[in-house]
Amino acid sequence: MDAKSVLYVRLPCWKIFPGGVIYVADYIHKRRPAIKQHLLDLALIEPSGRNQALAQAIRSMKPDVVAFSWRNMQSFGPHPEDDALDLVMEFDHSPRPWRRLKAMIGGLSIIADYYNQRLRNFGFMKLARKMCPDARIVVGGTAVTIFGKYVAAKCPADSVVVIGEGEAAMLSIVDGFTNPAGEYYYKDKSGRVVHQQRAEMFDLKTLTAIDFPYIESIFPAFGEYLNDTIGVHTKRGCPFQCNFCLYNKIEGPKQRDRDPVEIVNEIETLTRRYGVKHIWFTDAQFCSTPKSTRHVEAVLDEMLARGITVTWSGYVRLNHLTPSVARKMLATGMCSIDLSFTGSQEMINSLTLGYKLDQQMTAFQMFKENGYTDQQVKLYLPLNGPGETIDTLRATIDKIKELYAMFGRDHVLPFIFFIGVQPDTPVEKLLIRQGYLKAGYDPLSINPFTIKKLLYNPEPLGSLIARAYLEALEGLDPNSEYIGRATMDVLERELAKLPRKEAPEPASLVAE
């Protein structure tokens, strides 16, 4: 039976614009305008009031479809509402026993909270099923795409767990699910779970600019995000094979572009009608290949032609940057240069990042020479990844110092992170072969020792990096210094104490 009403429920997470579910709701409205839709954002509701808010929305709407959007699930994934990375470092490497004890208590609290969040999220689905016994339950979002099989097993009967893009799948669901589209797991009324692979990727050319006045009418909390960063995507898919990343599985390996005019229509509405000041381009990579660089330039040309005033940022690759594109990026309001960075070609190759360091450094110089003023240069450093050595760490520090000289130390922000091991990635398979992880391990385990392994920072370099971080953190004045810069300073000092021939070197995990 065709649906007449859809209730979208954004499951609790930190406050971040729910762009994915908004794109889906807008797409459904444009193709089935008679369907009544409503978006309830539990992220903006106090925990004690969430069940009541969901129950009230269901009573008021009596939806034919209840669609849940689930953003994050893994307990080791640090985010703005917790300090998991700090706690892991404190527990493993702090010289002070009381700080290790405090970190253990804090870490267990985070793990318990994540586990309880999972239970609560499935509880919201059970509440929806209880109140709407004939409605179809739909679950989508990033967490579900990574852990779809697990989610499907825990969902109520007659639930569709959408993997990856949601537009085509959701359209087939509201049309009665007689001709299912997209990739999904379906748990039928008897509890049996079936899986359908996607036959083709969604055609982004059909995705026109979001009708924000309509979204405002179905999403009462829309205005609460307008002073924050709003996500806009220009493309989907990633052709690269970085060995720790799932984007090419989530969005597919073929990069697909939206119409530049529609993208800028969207930005123009946000800025001129709603006063939005900052845009984040949510693409896996905003600028990465020769084709995508040409597409980016078309978007920037359209923004310049309309005189749009906005600041923006997004993850970039710089190997195909041209002086013209650099000038246009800065002229349209690019406020930070955000990218993965390691100053060693050996590590770039080990992580299969797919670019040349020399080209990247040349591109930085292009920004410097083509309109750079005071934009932040944000370097996301995958320290101690498979293949990291003392020499590659030293090389990364040297390149960061080159960037300090190029842009000014205060404008360069090295952001330290460790690779999070994700299921079905090349690095996970490699670590299982090497015995670092056990075959058949549970990627959603709440065992703290498993979780620590999934936040990959092995010895012998793990202690060195962690102690540098903790020393920097302890002496940090946040008003005058940034933790990443301070950490790299301490790390440089400690590396200088190690004779190169005597420095400990980890065994490479890169497959021959």
Image: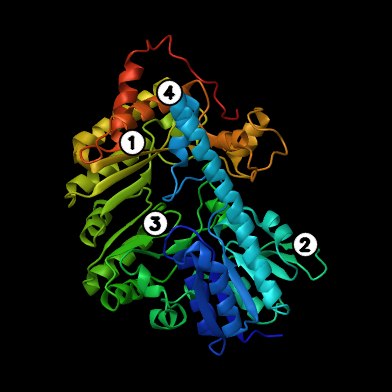
Q: Which residue: 62% across, 66% down?
A: 124
Q: Which residue is mark 1?
A: 358
Q: Residue furthest bottom?
A: 34
Element marked by disc 3: loop
The image's mark for residue 286 is 3
Amino acid type of the residue that numbered disc 1 sits on in the rendered structure: Asp
Q: How many residues crowd around disc 1 within 10 Å: few (fewer than 14), some, or many (20 or more)?
A: few
The image's mark for residue 193 is 2
> What distance separates the C-alpha of mark 2 from that of mark 3?
36 Å
The image's mark for residue 96 is 4
- Among the two numbered marks 2 and 1 on one chain, the one whose residue lies closer to the N terminus: 2
Q: Which residue: 44% across, 29% down?
A: 99
Q: Are marks 3 and 4 in contact (CB under 8 Å)?
A: no
Element marked by disc 1: helix
Q: How many residues crowd around disc 4 within 10 Å: few (fewer than 14), some, or many (20 or more)?
A: few
- Among the two numbered marks 3 and 4 on one chain, the one whose residue lies closer to the N terminus: 4
Q: How many residues crowd around disc 3 within 10 Å: few (fewer than 14), some, or many (20 or more)?
A: many
Element marked by disc 2: strand
> What distance separates the C-alpha of mark 3 from that of mark 4?
43 Å
> What distance separates the C-alpha of mark 1 from that of mark 4?
42 Å
